[in-house]
Image: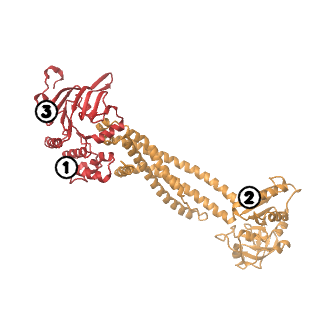
Chain colours: A orange, B red
Amino acid sequence: MSVLETFQLAIKNILSSKMRTFLTMLGIIIGVCAVIVIVGLGNGMQGYIEDSFADMGTDSLTVMIMGRGSSRSVSEEDMYELAEENSEYLKQISPTVTMMGSVKIGRDTLTATSITGISEDYFSMKGYEVVQGRGLQYMDMTDRKKVCVVGQYLNMAYFGGNAVGQTLKINGNTFTIVGVMAQEGSELEEGGTDDCVFVPYSTAARLSYTGTISSYTITVQNTDQISEAKAVVEQKLYQVFSDDDAYTVTSMAELVEEMNSMVNMIIYILAGIAAISLVVGGIGIMNIMLVSVTERTREIGIRKALGAKESAIMRQFVIEAATTSSLGGVLGILLGYGLSALATSVIANVMPDTPITVSPSLLAVVVAFGVSTGIGVVFGYLPAKKAANLNPIDALRYD
Amino acid sequence: MGALIEFRDVCKFYQMGDTTVKAANHISFQIQKGEFVAIVGQSGSGKSTCMNIIGCLDVPTSGAYLLDGQDVGQMNKNQLAEIRNKMLGFIFQQYNLLPKLTLLENVEVPLMYAGMPRSERHERAKIALEMVGLGNKLRHKPAQLSGGQQQRVSIARALAGDPAVILADEPTGALDSHTGREVLTMLQQLHAAGNTVVLITHDNSIAVQAQRIIRLEDGQVIYDGDASAPEAVVRPDAAGKGGMGL
């Protein structure tokens, strides 16, 4: 009796008691479905994290200088030199001075607006574009001009789309708007990506209380070598400070990786919990198979009398259990896909700002199917062994 | 050439609590190829034990059972299964058809375990069912048939593998006398066609349809000979057995 024929026999037996088979499979269906949805949710979250960080640029390093008292420090010239010396790794550098304070336009005071001092290279590093007027230039830096480029939100909300040439006040200093940045965020809103003012870093440093530049953004030549680039920068800074608490170098890519591994860990734990229901489902299958063996004792006796070897009986029951559970696995996968699609649209409706696409991975599907089949084999073994070991004489007399 | 079936001093003992039940107590006989033999006895006489041993469902405690010259007592479970499959055709009192399978599939079961290819199996099973007059009901389920018809299916199943011995265990036990006679006639036809038929029964009127009778009592052979002889049906020393009589 070939495996194919045994399989056909198993299908026949499964179809002859649909309700029972379905209930038997339920544990496996739920388990597989849960694992698929959870893994899909994890993938969705990772995708979301990567997308959001991609906006910030995964090709850039952020350097923060805390300093070590007043004795040692690095000037922006040192930093530019550093970037130039290591041009095989580092592409461009820009100081980034974050200014605290408020922006005043006419009579309106804006507190949510971000004010950043940058160099003339910053826009090209970040891929920002200027749609009206001009960007910040080298001369603006050297002359510490009080000019600025504003985000599209300010342009539309306060200047009616004609910001260039107008003025605004930052902490009491009047700045002339020379350019408007292209819209970056998906919506124009207060506190959003487009609610921003960019000024020359030199001007910002002078206006800020400390007067020093403590933060830099560096882009790398090759995103694959971001770790090497980071090491180079760290090494240089260590030569200056001899203390690795005096500075930090963070790469967005590493941050994304770290967050991804955290999400992964959570997902693995959740999937592990969901997998417990697979084991429970397997025990359910074993239970039903044991009942089935008892019910079919006479059939087993007849088959044995007619020449079925123990291995043939064994195979019949193991394949039946495996078919039941893998069928459950397939149904679980289908249900999992359905629920994933449902979850995606629910998330999109409930939290429109964080569109997470729940996408089950192919690997999860393959593993889920494999595991559910494996569970059938493992938990079908004991009942099958019981069936195979039945004494044909007793089995034939069984009512 | 030796006998097809040979019992040499076969014993089968069961332990039941403190007492040893001697289900078969030094039984010896031979059955030649082509014979039609009835093994007769009351319940407890050991005929079921004999049937199980002949059918290779059980092995003797001591003594030897040779089927076509092979010592069955020395075989393992797999070899027993194989010999049941190849050498024996079973006909049971309760028909023992598989209710979920069609008649054709039922007849195919032993052929399937013999590893016969599907198309050949179909062909053989069809021929066997046609022989017992059920060629028009191949796709029916056993439950759609009468008892007599079901027993004919089980005869077809026994025949399909072309076994050396057809072993019928009370084949008429669940049938009315008319259909019972039909089944017996069929067995006689099989015998006439050259098959070896062993019939196990408690009923003398059935047993006399065979050629030869082996009568068992208390696990021992008390008569072995021509079915038409008067001693075959009348216990020679019934009076002497006292309380054991009917």
Residue pointed to by mark 3: B227
Label 3 CA crowd tier, 10 Å (few <14, some 14–19, many 20+): many
Q: Which residue is labeled 2 in the image?
A: A228
Does residue A99 appear anywhere in the picture?
Answer: no
Q: Which percent across, then down, holds residue A260?
A: 64, 56
Q: Tell me where residue A146 sits by quadrant.
A: bottom right
Q: Secondary structure at mark 2?
A: helix
Please rate how many residues cluster around mark 1, counting C-alpha atoms within 10 Å: few if below 14, some from 14 to 19, many from 20: some
Residue B159 drawn above or below residue A69: above
Q: Of the two numbered discs 3 and 1 on the same chain, state the one appearing first in sequence.
A: 1
Q: Are marks 3 and 2 in contact (CB under 8 Å)?
A: no
Q: Is residue A47 left or right of residue A297?
A: right
Q: Is residue A376 toward the left or the right of residue B237 in the image?
A: right
* Residue A332 image label: none
Circle 2: is it few (<14), some (14-19), or many (20+) Cα within 10 Å?
Answer: some
Q: Do the residues indicated by labels 3 and 2 lie within the same chain of the protein? A: no
- CA distance for labels 1 and 2: 86 Å
- Dot 3 amino acid type: Ala
Observer able to see residue A272: yes
Q: Which amino acid, mark 2?
A: Glu
Residue A190, percent from left and from top: 69, 69
The residue to which callout 1 is attached is: B131
- SS for dot 3: loop
